[in-house]
Image: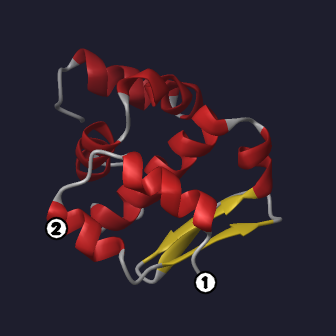
Amino acid sequence: MQNTEILEIIKTLNLTKTDRNKILGLRISLNNRTRGWARRSGFSVPMWAWDRGNNYFTYYICHELSHILAKGFKHDVYFYNKFKKICPTYLWIYEHEYLPTKWKKYLNNKGSYK
């Protein structure tokens, strides 16, 4: 199932052609749970993220896509490198709220996450 709202936002992201091809067949959906999820087969975004507004919803999509495109499901250097490439900079504040210590350290080191 492909959610049209999510697909419209994905079209606006700074994705390479390779990344766009990787996400073509993903299962993308909204859910009524407290958290989203990402797996190789797709990702889901909770409805409450939609309720927080378009900016937060876009951030949440970038976050989940970064897990898939970085081929890892933890917050490591690969995840953050991908996240920085696809997420608009004005939305990074939401990641800072989510994981303030790691994110701040990553940005202060200008790209090196340790």
Amino acid on which the number 2 mark rests in the picture: Thr
Assess disc 2: are there few (<14), some (14-19) or many (≥20) residues with their C-alpha within 10 Å of its C-alpha: few
Circle nearer the N terminus (2, 1)? 1
Q: 71 and 47: which one is in front? A: 47
What residue sits 27% from the left and 66% below the top? 20
What residue sits 73% from the left and 47% below the top? 50
Q: Are marks 2 and 1 in contact (CB under 8 Å)?
A: no
SS under mark 1: loop
Residue 18, which numbered label? 2
Badge 1 is on which residue? 1
Q: Give the farthest residue toward the top.
A: 108
Q: 82 and 100: which one is in front? A: 82
- Calculate the distance from the C-alpha at mark 2 to the C-alpha at mark 1: 21 Å
Rendering coords of residue 81 (x, y %): 23, 43
Which corner quadrant of the image does residue 58 belong to? top right
What residue sits 29% from the left and 27% below the top? 106
Q: 62 and 11: which one is in front? A: 11
Residue 94, which numbered label? none
Rendering coords of residue 16 (x, y %): 18, 56
